[in-house]
Image: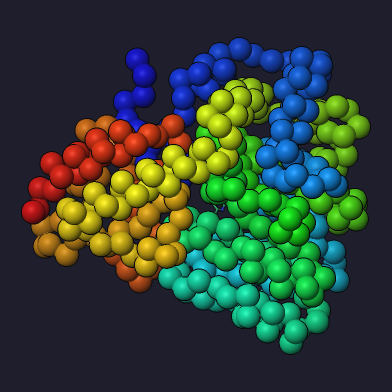
């Protein structure tokens, strides 16, 4: 029996049967067949995927994606550092919360959820507050599906010699981006988004010369990015604490499948065409997008809920689920929306089938 439904969410998402089958074996974690041949291979593949430039390394970290964000924020900003957070959605907000919890000095640019940040806003704050040492932003804000202007923001951050941290959780592997060329110092993502693995760990692509400065900075033992990196470097891929072996093995398979598909460019094409089919089909059925199309990402799209008095998200959701599709509730605070993701092992014909299923599920129309 295969999956009963397709997950049209921002993760965990639908994976291939072969990725799931890769989890059918148990692995010990102290031999080369796991550490050198799986973990180290993944680490170097991730660096190659992230940049063509030299001087980058990767660290894998147990937990959901947020653990990797928290590990980075908590491990790279020194006691006398200050973080500027660009916030235009729940994930930008979360970075601010992490800084708050960890007692890290920070300033938040609050944009609301439907505005895109501009490089000018960032540079204005950097110039007025010289205490700022680090800037953090989300690439694809999964709250709305908005793609933030990463190149322009990285440009100004670099022009002021600040450290750039990018939460590329929901875009890495699905949208072409060269971490080194953009001057990103720490880029964070996780196993269960565009690489199409299963949940269980995240990873950080780091500029090695910057990571080397982070010894003794961490505010948490288990989320010490520097120590985790040192352990993996010195022991050929050994994790400090229990590693999520099955997830890691599945990820290794997912990386092979990304390569077989034609790499990030091919995956970007598939996701983009999925998203176009989705938006075109939904508009034909009378749905309206929350964001202007120029702000859309090829990852996930927010739609306004129908205003019909009989419309109820729960009911709509259940009918669709019975027909094989799981959609996602909205996350925007001041607009009634729902979201449909199009990443994962999801193809153009699935999106056409989805549109047909939605047309038949519109019990209120
Ligand atoms: C998914 C996601 C995260 C991490 O979420 P977890 O639930 O901790 O895996 C962080 N940032 C963005 C932009 C995301 O899409």
Residue name at image x 56 percent, y 13 percent: 24
Q: Nearer the viewer, residue 197 or 222?
A: 197
Res 153 → quadrant:
bottom right
Res 348 → quadrant:
top left
Place of residue 67 in the rendered image (x, y in percent of width and height, measured from the top left): 65, 47
Q: Is 182 situated left or right of 286 in this image?
A: right
Q: Nearer the viewer, residue 362 or 28?
A: 362
- Say whether residue 138 is visible: yes
- Say whether residue 63 is visible: no
Q: Nearer the viewer, residue 51 or 117?
A: 51
Place of residue 146 in the rendered image (x, y in percent of width and height, measured from the top left): 46, 61
Q: How many marks?
A: 0
Residue name at image x 35 percent, y 15 percent: 1
Residue name at image x 61 percent, y 70 percent: 86
Place of residue 163 in the rendered image (x, y in percent of width and height, measured from the top left): 78, 64
Q: Is 59 situated left or right of 17 in this image?
A: right
């Amino acid at each position: 029996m295969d999956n009963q439904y397709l997950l049209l969410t921002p993760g965990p998402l639908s994976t291939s049967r072969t990725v799931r089958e890769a989890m059918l074996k148990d692995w010990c974690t102290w031999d080369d067949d796991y550490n050198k041949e799986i973990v180290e291979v993944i680490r170097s593949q991730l660096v190659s995927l992230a940049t063509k430039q030299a001087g980058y390394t990767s660290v894998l970290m147990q937990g959901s994606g947020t653990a990797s964000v928290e590990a980075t924020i908590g491990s790279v900003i020194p006691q006398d550092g200050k973080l500027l957070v660009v916030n235009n959605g729940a994930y930008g907000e979360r970075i601010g919360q992490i800084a708050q919890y960890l007692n890290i000095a920070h300033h938040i640019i609050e944009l609301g959820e439907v505005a895109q940040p501009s490089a000018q806003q960032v540079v204005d704050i950097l110039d007025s507050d010289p205490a700022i040492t680090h800037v953090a932003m989300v690439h694809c804000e999964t709250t709305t599906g908005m793609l933030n202007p990463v190149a322009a923001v990285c440009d100004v951050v670099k022009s002021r010699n600040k450290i750039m941290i990018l939460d590329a959780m929901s875009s890495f592997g699905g949208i072409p981006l060269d971490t080194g060329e953009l001057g990103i110092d720490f880029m964070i993502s996780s196993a269960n988004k565009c690489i199409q693995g299963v949940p269980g760990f995240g990873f950080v692509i780091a500029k090695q010369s910057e990571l080397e400065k982070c010894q003794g900075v961490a505010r948490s033992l288990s989320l010490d990015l520097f120590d985790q990196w040192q352990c993996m470097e010195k022991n050929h891929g050994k994790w400090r604490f229990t590693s999520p072996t099955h997830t890691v093995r599945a990820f290794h398979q997912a990386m092979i499948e990304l390569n077989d598909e034609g790499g990030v460019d091919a995956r970007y094409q598939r996701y983009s065409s999925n998203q176009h089919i989705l938006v075109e089909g939904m508009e034909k059925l009378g749905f309206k997008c929350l964001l202007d199309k120029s702000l859309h990402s090829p990852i996930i799209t927010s739609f306004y809920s129908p205003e019909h008095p009989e419309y109820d998200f729960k009911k709509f959701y259940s009918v669709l689920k019975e027909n094989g599709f799981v959609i996602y509730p909205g996350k925007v605070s001041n607009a009634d929306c729902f979201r449909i993701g199009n990443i994962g092992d999801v193809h153009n014909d699935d999106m056409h089938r989805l549109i047909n299923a939605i047309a038949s599920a519109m019990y209120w129309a």
